[in-house]
Amino acid sequence: MIKKLLLSGLSLSIILVCAILLQSSCTNSKQGDILSTLEKAHPRLILNDKGLAERTALMEKDENLKKYFQDVLKEADECLNEPMLTYDKESRNNLGISRECVRRIYSFGLAWRITGKEIYAEKAKENLLTVCSFPGWSPSFLAIAEMCHAVGVGYDWFYDYLKPDDRNTIKTALINKGIIPGIEAYSTEAWCINNEWNWNFVCNGGLIIGALAIADSEPDLSRYIVSNAVKSIPISLETYKPDGVWPESIVYWRYGMHYFIYSILAMETALNTDFGLSESEGLPEAGLFPIYGTSPTGHYICYADIPQNRRRTNIPGLFWLARRYNKPVLADEEHRMTIKHGAKAMDFIFYVPPAGKKLSSLPLDKFFHGKVGVAVFRSSWDNPNALYVSVKAGNNQSDHGNLDLGTFEVHALGERWAQDLGSEDYWLPGYWDLGKGGQRWTYYRMRSVSHNVPLIDGQDQDELAQTYITRFSTTPSSGFAILDLTPAYKEFAQKVTRGVAVIQGKRGVIVQDEFEIDTTRDIMWGIITDAEITVDEGNAVMKKNGKELKMQILSPAGAQFAVESAEQKPPLKPNEGFKRLLVRLQKQKENLRVTVLFSPVWEDGELVRSPDIVPLSEW
C-alpha cells in the first residue's frame, strides 16, 4: 500500500505516519476485523442491486414511487445540461460544489441504473473525473467529507462502467484528498470529527462512505476510517437524547440526521451491520421534532442559526426513521411534502409506502426534553390558521446558539406575530467566538435584545447560562410551560421565571414573567415582529395581510407599550420592516410580575377574556 501511495505523490513522512496509525488501529481494535463481513461486489453502498430491484418491482404497483422516480429522472436530465463543476480558488470552503456533486451523482446514478441509458453514466464519470482533478477539495473538512460522499458513491455505483484507469484516478483522489485528511483528523482528535454537533455526523458519514467504497482494494485505510468513525459518532448521538430534539435548530437536525442515515445505510449494505448505532436513545422519537417544530404557516421554529423564513420541505430521512422505528406517521408526512415539492433521489432511495396515518393521530402539544428544551402548542393539525406557540430553554453555548433562553413565537391566522430574525452572515469577524465576551455576542441578531426575552438593566443574558423547562401541562383546550431562566440573569436577579400558556380553547396566549430582585433594576419586556403596530398605552393592535391580533398588558398596572425599530446597518442584515414591541419598566425596586395577553381576532370576532392573574407557582 505504501508503494501505491508514493506513486500518488504523497510525502514519505505522511505515509509513514499513516502506516503507523493503521498498524496501531489493527493491533488494538477491540472489535476484531471491522471489515470481516465486507461485501466485495459493487455497488455495495446505500442502495445495492437487491435494494434497487425491490424499488423497481414496487414501482410497477405503486404510483407514488413511479411519480417520485420521474421527478428524479427529470432532475437528472436537468443536470445533463449543467456546466461542469469548477474549483473556486476564492471560496472559503467550496461546500456548495461538494453538495452539487452529491446531488448529481445520486440523480445520474438512479437514472442510469434504472433506465440503462449510458448518457447518465458518462456524465457522472465526467463529473467525477473533474472533481478528482481539483487541486484539493476544500479548506473546510465539512466540504471534504461531502465530496468523499459524492466520490465514494460515484466510484461504487459506476464501478462496472468505469475503465480501470478512471477507477484508479478516482480512487487515488479519494485517498489523497479525502481519506488521508480524515486519518490526520482522527489521529489529532480534531474538532471536526469529535464534536457533539452536526459536523460529527457529516464528517464521519462522508468518510465512512468514501472508505467503504474502496475497502476491497484498500482494507487498511478503510478499516482505520470506519473503526474510528464508529467510535466517534456516539459523541453526537448523545445530543439526540432523550427524545430527538436538536439544539442547532431543525435545519441542522435535518443535515446531521441525513448524514447519520447515510452512514448507517452504507455500513448495513457494505458490512451487514451498523454496530448498534441506530439503537441509540432518542432516535425513535427524533422524527417528530421537525413535524412538531413546523407551524401551521409552514415555517420552522426559528432559533439558533436558522434562516428566518425557512419553511418545511422534503426530509427524506423521515422515510428511513418511519421504517426503522415503526413510525408510519413520519412516512405519511413526508409523502405530503414530497407530493407538494417534488421528490429527490433520497425520497426514492428511502421510500416507504403510505400507511394512511394522518398528523391528527398525534397529540396537539409536545414537550421535547433534550439539551434545548422545546415546548410547542397548537389548536389544530389541519387548519392553516390555527394557533401555534413555541418556547425554548437550553444552553447559550450550544453550537450556533443565540442569547435567547426563554424566547417564544406566536403564530395564528396564517401569520407570524412574535417571531425571530434568524441567522446572521456566517463570515462576520468573530461570528464563531461563542465564549464569555465573544465577538459573536456583539451582533444584533445574536444578542438578547433581538429576541423575545426580557432584559434587565439593558444587558444580554449570561453567555454561559443553561436553563430548563421545569413544568409542562397540556389539555385539549389549554396548556402551559414554565421555564426557570434564573441562570441567564444571575448577575441581576435572585430568580427569573417565565410562563407561556395557551388558554380558552387555545384561542389566546398568555406570557407571564416573574422577577425576584433586591435592588433597583430596569426591566424591559419585548418581542420582534414585522406587523404594523398601533399602540394605546397598555394596549396594542398588530396587523398583517388583513389579519389582526390584539395585545394587552395585564400587569403591572399602568405599564405601557412602546415601539422601536429593529433595523440595522451594514455589514449586518437590515431587518427591514422589523420592529420591537416593548414594555419598559424603570427603577423597579421590588419583585415584579409582567403579564401580557395575545388575542388573535378570529373569524367569529370573539376575543379571549382577560384571565385572572395568579403566580406561576399556581398555574
Image (cartoon, helix red, strand yellow):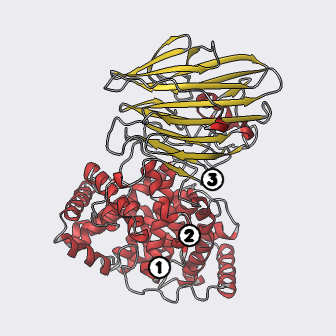
Determine whether 584 is above or below 362 in the image: above
Residue 196 x/y as whole percent: 63, 59
Kind of residue at disc 1: Ile
Q: Quadrant of the N terminus?
A: bottom right
Q: What residue is drawn where x is 26% and y is 77%?
A: 54
Q: Which residue is mark 2?
A: 280
Label 1 crowd bin: few (<14), some (14–19), many (20+), radius 10 Å: many
The answer for how far apart the CA atoms under marks 1 and 2 are is: 28 Å
Q: Are marks 3 and 1 in contact (CB under 8 Å)?
A: no
Between 41 and 218, which is closer to the camera in this rendering? 41
Residue 106 x/y as whole percent: 34, 64
Determine whether 279 is above or below 587 in the image: below
Q: Quadrant of the C terminus?
A: top right
Q: Secondary structure at mark 1?
A: loop
Between 181 and 111, which is closer to the camera in this rendering? 111
The answer for how far apart the CA atoms under marks 2 and 3 are is: 16 Å
Q: Which residue is mark 3?
A: 371
Question: Of discs 1 and 2, which sits in the foreground?
Answer: 2
Q: Report the disc number at residue 214.
A: 1
Q: Secondary structure at mark 2?
A: loop
Q: What residue is drawn where x is 33% and y is 56%?
A: 334
Kind of residue at disc 3: Lys
Q: Is residue 331 visible?
A: yes
Kind of residue at disc 2: Ser
First in sequence, mark 1 or 2: give its number. Answer: 1
Q: Secondary structure at mark 3?
A: loop
Residue at the farthest right position = 519
Between 221 and 535, which is closer to the camera in this rendering? 535
